[in-house]
Image: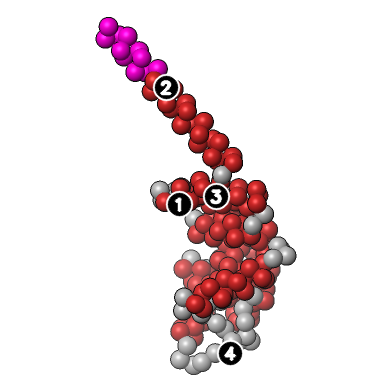
Amino acid sequence: MKKLILKTAFITLGATIVALVAVFGLMSLWAPAAMMKLTASLGLDSISGDYAYQEYQRSGKISYLARSFIISVNAKDDKKAEKRFELLYHDEEFDTFCAEQDEIALLEGISTGYRSYVCAEAARMKYRMAEKSDWGTVCQFASDETDKNFPLGNPLVALATEAISREDKEFCNFLIPYISDFEFAEDSDYNYIIKFVKDLAGGAQ
């Protein structure tokens, strides 16, 4: 009798597990946006980013692509982030999407431009992946995406900060010409960052 009860229990458990796996699979296939939210709520950020990308592929909505890029770049999953950024950056809706995000940010009291933020994260990613022969392309990208008034959180500062954190003297020396054409207040915090770049570069061999 006990064997029959145990056998029935195991069969029921097995059927339940199979059903859950089936439901999970169907949700992943047909409702990646819901799975994105679920995995995010569970703290599974990387998986949530993958579901966001799946939802972008399904719906074509750029907001999901942007989310998937931000998650992957924050996780320093640079190969994945690079692919997603290229799609995002060259999407015909990118400028409009950034402007919409800026309007939302202003309502929340945030002044940092969304495009600047995304490109700053991309500059960090590009630097981490770059060979020495690619440094010029990385620096030029950061410079092109940095407004002349040197706003908060711009790509050049992000690039400099990443290099400083790695104590990359040679790269800091390479970066100096790209930051020399910008002007900003003498008491700006960025003066300290630029000073750190030059000080570190001064020790380059």
Q: Which is more foreground, mark 4 or mark 3?
A: 3
Residue farthest along the bottom direction in this orientation: 186
> Total marks drawn?
4
Q: Residue at x 49, y 55 (%)?
A: 75
Answer few, some or many: residues within 10 Å of disc 3's Cα (few below 14, many 20 plus, some between 14 and 19).
many
Mark 1 = which residue? 40
Q: Main secondary structure of the magenta part?
A: helix
Residue 51, image x and y in percent? Answer: 55, 48
Q: Nearer the viewer, residue 133 or 64?
A: 64
Disc 1, SS: helix
Image quadrant where one finds the N terminus: top left
Front one among 187 and 31: 31
Badge 3 amino acid? Ala
The tag earlier along the polypeptide, 2 or 4, is 2
Closest to the camera, between mark 1 and mark 3, is: 3
How is the protein colored in the picture?
secondary structure
Q: Is residue 3 visible?
A: yes
Within the magenta stretch, is there residue 3? yes
Q: Which residues are magenta?
A: 1-11
Q: Secondary structure at mark 3?
A: helix
In the rendered structure, does residue 70 fall within the stretch colored magenta?
no
- In this rendering, which labeled residue sits more in front, label 2 or label 4? 2
Q: Amino acid at mark 2?
A: Gly
> Mark 1 or mark 2, which has the lower sequence index?
2
Regarding mark 4 in the picture, which secondary structure is present there? loop
Image-quadrant location for residue 144: bottom right
Q: Position of residue 127 (x, y in %)?
A: 59, 64
Query: CA separation, marks 4 and 3?
Result: 43 Å
Q: Which residue was labeled with disc 4?
A: 183
Q: Position of residue 193 (x, y in %)?
A: 48, 80
Number of the label disc, if any, that sits on residue 33:
3
